[in-house]
Amino acid sequence: MFNYLANPDRFMRFSKIATPIFALLAFVILVFGSVWSLAFAPADYLQGQSARIMFVHVPAAWVAFSAYSVMAGGSLVYLVWRHNLADVAANAASTIGATFTAVCLLSGSIWGRPTWGTWWVWDGRLTSMLVLLFIYLGYIALRSAISDKQKSASAGAILCLVGTVNIPIIRYSVVWWNTLHQPAAIIRKGGPSIHPEILQPLLFMGLGFMLLFGALLLLKMRALIFQNRAAVLAHRLLDEIS
């Protein structure tokens, strides 16, 4: 499947069909998931209604990690095999990942105000997520600052791969350091600690967010491919005129 989609023309044919399907599924799931999580899921027994922001905060964090995984995978493939479509995927995932990381941080701050009594604390999980946002923004800025496309792609790929050291720090920060942020509640030894009536809509919202990420990624990749093709055509026209 990967080899099939590695061809830009085949990818464009596939994404033309898959993008609206992903978008429609994401819309339907997020609408039903929002109603389920806001109207029917029970309030948390300790935090009350304020805990409902987890239905946005947690899926946004999942997308932030997924987008960086796409970036890292695309960057590695580009550096090793110089595959342009892999670079397109990494480039497309960067802006999406930065947006969802910002949503995660903002929603977490809103959640932290009634829970911790403050908008922000410099604990391990929050600080490492902020570093992730800075890595995303640094990647975007670096690529924008270099006009040569190959040099831009290579520099961005190296920065992205260096930045992957932050991912395990985010994952295990609540284990390594004493933190206000709650420990892992879903992927943990002994199974999830969240009640099924809250866990089920949370996973449902997570699916909707991931489908939305898929739709946005395909849409952004298509836009970048069209942009690259337009630049090539413009360059050829200028050569013919001159």
Image (cartoon, grey):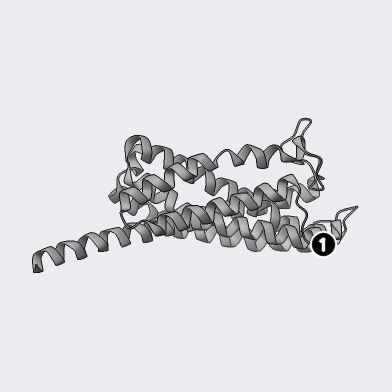
- Judge whether residue 215 can be spotted in this image: no
* Amino acid at pointer 1: Arg
Q: Nearer the viewer, residue 97 or 4?
A: 97
In front: 31, or 153?
A: 153
* Residue at x 64% of width, y 63% of height: 31
- Identify the residue at image location x=37%, y=51%: 152
Number of residues whose C-alpha sits closer than 10 Å to that of mark 1, classed few (under 14), some (14–19) or many (20 or more): few
| Quadrant containing the C terminus in the rendered view | bottom left
For label 1, the residue is 113
Task: Farthest residue to the top: give it.
Answer: 189
List x then y, in percent, for residue 202. Answer: 71, 51
Q: Residue reaching furthest bottom?
A: 241
Q: Is residue 11 left or right of residue 132?
A: left
Question: Where residue 159 sits: x, y (%)?
Answer: 47, 45
The image quadrant that residue 38 belongs to is: bottom right
Residue at image x 55%, y 56%? 98
Residue at the (26%, 63%) spot, across then down: 230
Q: Nearer the viewer, residue 36 or 112?
A: 112
Horizontally, is 48 left or right of 36 in the view? right
* Residue 70 position (above or below residue 225): above
Name the image quarter holding the N terminus: top left
